[in-house]
Image (tube, grey):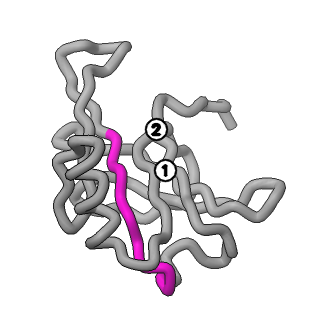
Amino acid sequence: MNMKSVTGIGGIFFKAQDPDKMNDWYKAHLGLDTSEYGVRFEWLEKSDPSKTGTTQWSTFSETTDYFQPSSKDFMINHRVEILDQIETYDFGKFVHILDLEGNKIELWEPTDAS
């Protein structure tokens, strides 16, 4: 298998007691243009500046099971080139792994439209 490396951060997700209030706080105090899904930061691809990349910042309910089997309160989504069995959606391909300390890591290969 040809080893590929992470190409960027696709998202930062964390649990909050009240995600809506947390989004409102970040909007009011740090100027983030949040919605119910958080905020999306756009940037240009280093390898091809004609392509736009994104990083998603989102809050989740503290009772979400989306981060399982990790028991941590956060998850980082890494942008990568994926070579193995994956799930495919309109916005990209995903696979999950756990790191040494049990943190869930979401690997994402975006579509060109993402």
For disc 1, the marked residue is 77
Q: How many marks?
A: 2
For disc 2, the marked residue is 9
Name the kind of residue labelled 2 in the image.
Ile
Q: Which residues are the magenta region? A: 55-64
Q: Is residue 105 left or right of 55 when viewed as pictured?
A: right
The answer to whether residue 85 is above or below residue 33 is below
Q: Is residue 89 left or right of 65 when viewed as pictured?
A: left
Quarter of the image where one finds residue 48: top left
Q: Main secondary structure of the magenta part?
A: strand
Residue 34 in the image: state x and y as whole percent: 20, 54
The answer to whether residue 64 is above or below residue 113 is below
Residue 15 in the image: state x and y as whole percent: 49, 70
| Circle 2 residues within 10 Å: few <14, some 14–19, many ≥20 | some
Residue 38 in the image: state x and y as whole percent: 27, 58
Within the magenta stretch, is there residue 79? no
Residue 13 in the image: state x and y as whole percent: 45, 58
* Pointer 1 or 2: first along the chain: 2
Residue at (26% x, 38% y) in the render: 41
Name the kind of residue labelled 1 in the image.
Asn
Q: Is residue 112 left or right of 100 when viewed as pictured?
A: left
Mark 1 touches mark 2? (CB < 8 Å)? yes
Residue at (59% x, 68% y) in the render: 73
* Real-space Cα separation, disc 1 to disc 2, in angstroms: 6 Å
